[in-house]
């Protein structure tokens, strides 16, 4: 019998991207449920940090997923990912962060790591994951806030144009460039081949890890 995966999103803009990669890498008998609550990210951005209220709500979603038959939960948002650490303590199913495998891969590739985000609340959690994976690395964070606003308005071309400037600048002085949010993976087809080896995004790596976990259950 196939497994059920709940993917918890905090913005609708990445559902199609995550879903397309999931079809490629997940076992064919996995049932995927997408749950979207953009208030989790909106409230985090307003507060400038992950709050207790947002943490409680995210944990409740994970508990709900477990109650209604999910075998695993994947969080696709980096800004609220520290709440996963709480959720893991109160449920008996795996709860995964989409960006955890990306952080682990980043420290395998180099010691000078640039983290680029389009919203400020993502920078801290991503840097934290990288430092947890390897404390001795150097992490420089860069914010490209205009790109997020462009993507939220449906202008992916402008999002990618703004983001590419930061990627080019970061790549000259760092071993690895980490694009902190899953939504930033939309730019991959536009990155030159010579630069791709330096750039990491979370969706495919996170879903490959999820596939491995589901197969082990």
Image (cartoon, rainbow, N blue to C red):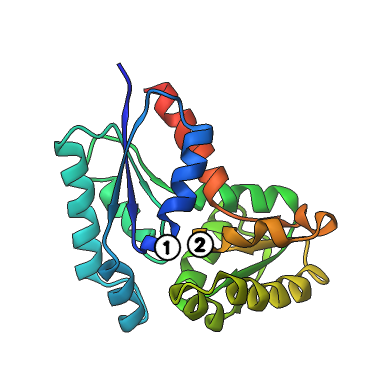
- Other-residue count near label 1 (Cα within 10 Å), few / some / many at <14 / 14–19 / ≥20: some
> Residue at 58% across / 58% down in the picture?
185
Q: How many marks?
A: 2
Q: Could you tell whether 83 is left or right of 198 in the image? A: left
Q: Are marks 1 and 2 in contact (CB under 8 Å)?
A: yes
* Cα gap from disc 1 to disc 2, whole angstroms: 7 Å
Q: Front-most of 41 and 82?
A: 41
Helix or strand or loop: what does disc 2 sit on?
helix
Q: Quadrant of the N terminus?
A: top left
Q: Which residue is tagged 2?
A: 183
Name the residue located 56 percent from the left edge and 63 percent from the top edge: 184
Q: Quadrant of residue 91 in the image?
A: top left
> Taking 116 as reference, is 109 left or right?
right
Drawn side of residue 127 relative to residue 58, left or right: right
Tell me where residue 117 sits by quadrant: bottom right
Residue under numbered circle 1: 13
Above or below, 76 against 160 in this view is above
Q: Earlier in the sequence, mark 1 or mark 2?
A: 1
Q: Residue at x 21, y 42 (%)?
A: 65
Q: Position of residue 147 (x, y in %)?
A: 55, 78
Image spot of residue 78 (x, y percent): 44, 61
């Amino acid at each position: 019998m196939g497994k059920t995966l709940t993917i918890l999103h905090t913005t609708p803009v990445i559902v199609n991207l995550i879903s397309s990669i999931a079809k490629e890498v997940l076992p064919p008998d996995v049932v995927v449920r997408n749950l979207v609550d953009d208030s989790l990210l909106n409230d985090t951005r307003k507060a400038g940090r992950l709050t207790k209220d947002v943490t409680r709500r995210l944990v409740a979603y994970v508990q709900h997923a477990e109650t209604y038959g999910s075998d695993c939960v994947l969080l696709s948002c980096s800004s609220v990912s520290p709440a996963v650490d709480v959720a893991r303590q109160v449920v008996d199913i795996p709860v995964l962060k989409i960006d955890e495998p990306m952080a682990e891969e980043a420290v395998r590739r180099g010691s000078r790591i640039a983290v680029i985000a389009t919203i400020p609340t993502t920078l801290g959690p991503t840097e934290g994951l990288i430092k947890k994976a390897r404390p001795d690395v150097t992490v420089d964070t860069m914010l490209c806030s205009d790109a997020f606003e462009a993507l939220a308005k449906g202008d992916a071309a402008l999002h990618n144009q703004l983001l590419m400037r930061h990627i080019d600048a970061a790549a000259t002085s760092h071993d690895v460039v980490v694009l902190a949010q899953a939504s930033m993976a939309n730019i991959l087809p536009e990155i030159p081949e010579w630069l791709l080896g330096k750039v990491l995004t979370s969706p495919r790596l996170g879903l490959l890890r999820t596939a491995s976990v589901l197969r082990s259950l």
